[in-house]
Image (spheres, rainbow, N blue to C red):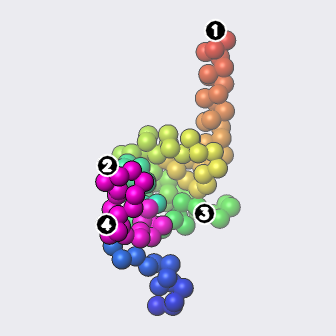
Amino acid sequence: MAPETAESLRMSSLAVSFPAEDEPGDTPDDAVDVAPVVVQLLRRPRWQTRAECRGQRVEMFIPDRGGPSARAKQLCARCTVRAECLKFALAIPDLVGYWAGTNERERRRLRAERRRRLRERAAS
């Protein structure tokens, strides 16, 4: 393994230590340095662990412009957490790729429709 790869994957344990409640802000001596990638994984929404796309290559969901997207849409169509995924994707405007079977353009349109409905409700 190349040194830069080994360094980027360096991690001694997945265990994480937290300060005792009676000592806020203190870092215990036995705290483990957790790799940033692990922290990102731990912060992911729980529903992502049940998603059909779990374990699939990211490239499938971020195709080149005009590239194939049928496989991504097929996975999304049968996914049990599609509603949660769409809610997540709509909340992050700069999210790229296919989420809940929608691409960026489709999500922009959904956001615009939602804003329009909210304005109509407020006006009535």
Residue type for callout 1: Ser
The answer to whether mark 4 and mark 3 are in CB contact below 8 A is no
**Reading the chain from its start, which is encountered first: label 1 or label 3?**
3
Nearest the eye: 8 or 18: 18
Q: Where is residue 107 shown, x and y percent of the image?
A: 61, 42
Residue 124 is marked as 1
Q: Is residue 26 magenta?
A: yes
Distance (Cα) linking label 2 and label 3: 50 Å
Q: Quadrant of the C terminus?
A: top right
Residue in the image at 44% along x and 62% along y: 39
Residue extending farthest to the top is 124
CA neighbours of label 3 inside 10 A, class few (<14), some (14 to 19), many (20+): some
Q: Secondary structure at mark 3?
A: loop
Asked whether the viewer can see residue 102, the reply is yes
Residue 82 placement, left or right of 18: right
Which region shows up in magenta?
17-39
> Residue at label 4?
15
> Mark 1, mark 3: which one is toward the viewer?
1
Residue displayed at 48% across by 67% down: 36
Q: Amino acid at mark 3?
A: Pro
Identify residue type, mark 4: Ala
